[in-house]
Image (cartoon, helix red, strand yellow):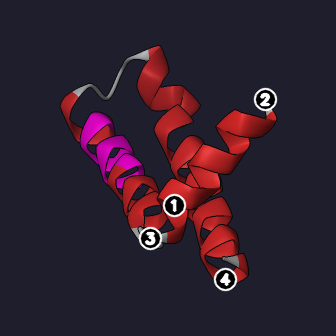
Amino acid sequence: MSKLLDKLSEYLAHRKGLLPIIGILLIIVNLAVQFIFPNTPLAYSNIFLHVGLIVAVLGLMLAWAL
């Protein structure tokens, strides 16, 4: 687990904007799902919005720390 975390931090240290961009893309996917599939449980749950927000905030915190 320690080696995986070390490799991940080394990878993300050179790509500081990757996680916030992925988070923003997930939020945009959530917006598209709301319009394309409005009456599905996926649209009601807003799962992409919540995951995208968490990924973006964690990405910003990691970028600041690294």
Q: Relative to 40, is 48 on the left or the right?
A: right
Report the disc number at residue 64: 4
- In three-dimensional space, the C-alpha distance between marks 1 and 4, rounded to whole angstroms, equals 11 Å
Residue behind mark 3: 14
- In three-dimensional space, the C-alpha distance between marks 4 and 3, rounded to whole angstroms, equals 12 Å
- Circles 4 and 3, Cβ within 8 Å, touching? The answer is no
Label whose residue precedes the other's in the sequence (2 or 4): 2
Residue sitting farthest toward the right: 2
Q: Residue at x 57, y 29 (%)?
A: 45
Disc 4: CA contacts within 10 A as few (<14), some (14-19) or many (>=20)? few
Residue 17 percent across, percent down from the top left: 42, 72
In magenta, the rendered stretch is: 26-33
> Which quadrant is the N terminus positioned in?
top right
- In three-dimensional space, the C-alpha distance between marks 3 and 2, rounded to whole angstroms, equals 21 Å
* Mark 3 element type: loop
Predominant secondary structure in magenta? helix
* Mark 2 element type: loop
Residue 61, compared with residue 2, is above or below; it is below
Label whose residue precedes the other's in the sequence (4 or 3): 3
- In three-dimensional space, the C-alpha distance between marks 1 and 2, rounded to whole angstroms, equals 16 Å
* Mark 1 element type: helix
Q: Residue at x 70, y 73 (%)?
A: 61
Report the disc number at residue 12: 1
Residue 33 percent across, percent down from the top left: 29, 35
